[in-house]
Image: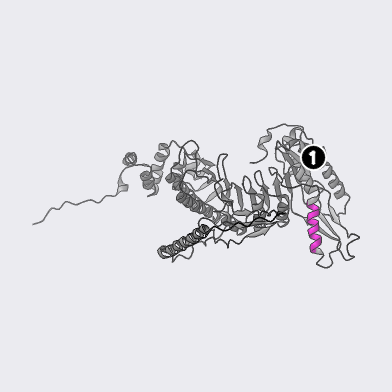
Amino acid sequence: MSLNIPHICSSSLLELPNELFLVIATYLDNDGLLYLSATCKRLNLLLLPTLFKRHQYSLPASSMEGSLPPLSFNGESLVVLPAIAIASYIHSIEDIDCAFFAYNRYVLPKEIFDAARALHALATRLRYLGHLRFNPYVAGHSMHELFGWSLAVCAILNSAIERPEGDCAITVYSGLRDDYVSDPRPYSHVFPNQPKQSSTNPVPRLPNPSQYRLSLGTALVQKVRKALASIFRRRRPSSNTANHNTPPLITCPSPSPLYHNGIHSTLRPPALPLHHPLKPTLTSLSIHSSFLLHANFYLWTVQTLNASPALSVLSLAHIDLSHYDWHLTLPRLTLSALQVLRVGAGVNVSVPDLDDFLGRHAGLIELDLRGHVAIGALVPGFAVKANLEGKVNGAAKGKNASGRVEEFLPNLKKLLATPDYLLYFLTEDASSPPSSSSPPSSPSITLVTFPALHYIAAASDDDTSYPYQIGLFEAVVDCLEMRRERVIGASSNSRMNAKTKLEVLGRLAWHCQVPEHLRVKESDGFLSGSGRGNGSERRRNWSADVWD
């Protein structure tokens, strides 16, 4: 007797038609639809448009070809970023601009961290990522979330810095209303007050016995707290002890105070240790926010900059550190491949500290100081004399230094600055003959500034010093004329460039005229604005010239 057992057909979920999947997608929330879209390529192509339509976000038409133009996200469109991160058909993005905070609505912590993980995934898997810009400012969250946010930002930066192609430029910026006042600065400075000496002897005050009892009780309570903390402290079990590719942690040096000019400065330790990249391929970094140079990220930023052998472009702007902090920070930076340096508004670097940094980076090709307000006296020619003095002091210890020619920034080709900065750098080359008071063996050194200089741009948009800069522009023109005549009359083996051109940018273009033989032409190859900037033919919007 045979039993007729019905055959049970096994079916897979993927055997359903696309129409049923679209109906199922209408019953799923955002997370469920995202997880279902990530299961396979078919559902990825089918369901992601539904997610974009739900958030009223449309991708460009070129998205199906795999490449996307520049994309911008803010606090309202952050929910779309995880969907773009799992889109398997997207393999290259030209530019990503992401702000994690919205001023018109409260952004949930889940949305912020999901977007951070999506950025980390994009920076890891994309074949090409041209530029990553993001504003890490997050407000209205608890301290625990802020500490977790620092780790999330560190993961984003490390994934972009460690890209094997080295094609991703990074810009960290801040908004107009972002408030970093409560964040600790990297150094704490103590200005010791000198006690005033009184002619009359003060009457000694008798000690109060209650103060001794209070101090004794306080010390006893502190000892009990330390003992209890050592008893109940437990070491966290490491989940990846066998993984030897874990990035090393940033270790804070001992907080020994630094003494400079009578000021006691101490490096603040970070709130939690951060991992720095193992093999950084960073080529361009723009720090336009205080986030990376405050206490939590200060050591990570300094060590990452020094450990990036291919870093050639560094831009600094809108960093609310004091010039005491910069005085201790710039000597810690040694960028061997640096070629372009831009120092903009909101950077309180003093003139001597900037000179010292420039003197240690002789490979600079472009120097942009248009938005920087100098801290210190810009005495014309003082930069040359200061560098010359250092060369003489160094050469006095050596032999056969007499008659030597030293070059200051020998590879610099483009210089963009305000007229007072231009006079400070371009004043007539100085020489140091042995004086009558010096011994006969004192060396004689000639210092030549910017022998390869091709292009100079004068700009000033500062309302406080704008009339003053107009008055200095004529002195800049005279300085270039003298430089040109001196180069023409020099020997043929001189490396000085006699065809240095001058352009006027910003509000100076409305009032200053450039001589015909010094004007920038299209054939020169470095024209910044197609005939503009000569001060006569075209008047234009001056606010677009000086970068923020």
x and y percentages locating residue 355 in the rendered image: 73, 53
Q: Nearer the viewer, residue 129 or 510?
A: 510
Q: Secondary structure at mark 1?
A: helix
Point 80% across, 37% down: residue: 471
- The percent coordinates of residue 424 (x first, y second) are 78, 47
Q: Quadrant of the N terminus?
A: bottom left
Between residues 155 and 380, which one lies in front from this camera angle? 380
> Of helix, strand and loop, which mostly describes the magenta segment?
helix
**Relative horizontal placement of residue 468, taking residue 223 as reference (left or right):** right
Vertical arrangement, residue 51 with respect to residue 449, above or below: above
Residue 497 drawn at (x, y percent)? 80, 50
Which stretch is magenta? 383-394
User: Circle 1 sits on which residue?
Assistant: 472
The reply to whether residue 302 is visible in this rendering is yes
Q: Is residue 238 visible?
A: no
Q: Is residue 317 left or right of residue 445?
A: left
Magenta span contains residue 243: no
Residue at (41%, 65%) from the top-left corner? 231
Question: Of all residues shown, which one is farthest toward the right?
Answer: 436
Closer-to-camera residue (176/179): 179
Say whether residue 384 is magenta.
yes
Q: Residues within 10 Å of mark 1 (few under 14, many from 20)?
A: some
Q: For this view, does 241 lie left or right of residue 389?
A: left
Q: Which quarter of the figure is the C terminus placed in?
A: top right
Q: 174 or 21: which is nearer to us?
A: 174
Q: Residue 414's x, y, as percent?
A: 73, 47
Relative to 528, 226 lies left or right: left
The three-letter code of the residue at mark 1 reads: Leu
